[in-house]
Image (cartoon, rainbow, N blue to C red):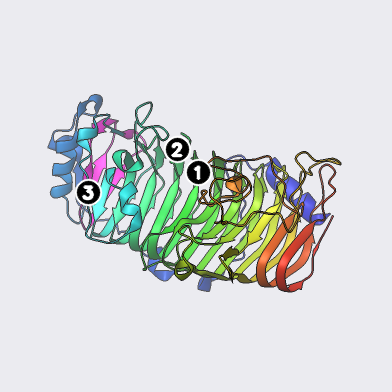
Amino acid sequence: MMRRLYLLAVLAGCGSAPPVVNDLGPDDLSTDTMDLAPDLAAQKICNVRAYGAVGDGVTKDTVAIQAAVADCTGGIVRLENGIFLSGMIVLSSHVTLEITGSATLLGSQDIADYPDRNPPIQNTQLASCKKSLIYAESADDIHLQGTGTIDGNAAPLWIGLQIKEGLRPMAIFTVSSTNVTITDLTVRKAGVWAVVNMEVKHLHISGLHVDNDFGVTHDGIDVVDGQDVLIENCTIASGDDSICLKSGSTNGLVDVTVRNCHTTTSGVANGVKFGTASVGPFKNITVENVLIENASAAALSVESVDGSAISNIIFRHITIRNAGTPIFVLLGSRNRDVTQVGSIDGVSFDDIHALGPANAWGSVVTGTVIGTQTFGISNLSFSNLDLVEKGAGATPNPAPFTIDTFPEYQGPVPGQPGKFYNQYPDVKFIAGTDGNADTTYYAPGYAFFVRHASGITFNACTTPLAGTDIRPALASKDVTGLVGGCTP
């Protein structure tokens, strides 16, 4: 009952502010990321108007802004009092780009103003990351700050899947860089993923307001590989995944904290997601004090489908409202290659509260079978959960899957219903065929279905039903070392 009252209190006053639990000690913070902000006291100020910028929202100011960047090493390039229309701006080392509250950097709608960038790295995600309004490559000590706005100006040209991702501009893209901070800005209307950092070491993102709710392929904040990352105090509305941690190289993503954030909308996808790109390891990652609302797939999604070894992951103090399902964990191989299956070993979910589920799927936690080989997940713990479940009704239609009929990811027969073959590895595609989502299925357990797993612990897990359901709260198959359970 106390957990239920806590949840209702948080949601009643959520507004745009995330829930905050101040139980972090000094050892929880990275001294590297926390010390990135420059000393502004004696820095050179380069106002872009002094370089010829007009700021009328009509004249292209790209050349003037770029000239200010070239002249301002060690200083601040400042945009204020205007709307500055621009194509791609390339930042160099030791430069701060400041967009004040009176200014907007407005992206040009001429795609020729965004030449392709091809950084010299090997990363599977580069195919989707070719163009950007703000770009930095192999730079050190770069900072984007201010209370102003970066407007990608995407509508209606670059919405959805009509144009491939790599042909549309991101709002911010930093790659192969170090000591990067992005703080307090509003970022909206990006042509594809909004804020993207790839293979960046020592990254601090704080206080962003991201509004990129344009449907599929319009993520909020994406971090693709990297090390020593802190994302905090951000509010994100996205059309796709809101906070997406990816790996497209063997470098992986290591030492990451996401905290005190609020994802208000994750239109077709997930609130916080690991994957789908999952080549290198995800290791030492904590997601805490996060409010997730209106995620049509899963609130929390952990996927290893490209060989990633996922370990030492902590989710704690999470509040969920109106998500397709609270939790989705999947180990598999998109290529059905037994040599390209990674691992999920050591993930904890603690103090998770969910209210107002959109669907009665149940949370799915599963390994996979490829041919005659089984690949299982291991050492997952679920504690202090209070998940209000929708219920499928007394006579659900369609009938729920049983533990023996629930489809395997990458099943053996392409194109047949219920085989989850070559589908996008997300909770909405479990029962779909030919690449289509299907939201009309029910897992064997109304709260959890756990399969192909070992060392699974449930402690203080309550899963009250908002309606009725004939399924058990927890169903399992091919699980060893299952401790505890869930009760209404």
> Disc 2 or 3, which lies upstream in sequence?
3
Q: Nearer the viewer, mark 2 or mark 1?
A: 2
Q: Nearer the viewer, residue 69 or 343?
A: 343
The answer to whether residue 335 is magenta is: no
Q: Identify the residue under disc 3.
A: 117
Q: Amino acid at mark 2?
A: Asn
Picture coordinates of residue 124, whole percent (x, y): 34, 57
Picture coordinates of residue 139, whole percent (x, y): 23, 59
* Quadrant that contains the C terminus: bottom right
Q: Residue at x 56, y 50 (%)?
A: 426
Q: Nearer the viewer, residue 228 or 448?
A: 448
Q: Nearer the viewer, mark 3 or mark 1?
A: 3
Q: Residue at x 49, y 38 (%)?
A: 239
Q: Residue at x 52, y 42 (%)?
A: 434
Q: Nearer the viewer, residue 433 or 242?
A: 433
Q: Real-space Cα distance between discs 2 and 3?
A: 22 Å
Q: Identify the residue under disc 1.
A: 236
Q: Amino acid at mark 1?
A: Ile
Q: Residues within 10 Å of mark 3 (few under 14, many from 20)?
A: few
Picture coordinates of residue 419, whole percent (x, y): 60, 51
Range of magenta residues:
76-105
Occupied quadrant, residue 318: bottom right
> Disc 2 or 1, which lies upstream in sequence?
2
**Residue 40 at least partly seen:** no
Q: Identify the residue under disc 2.
A: 212
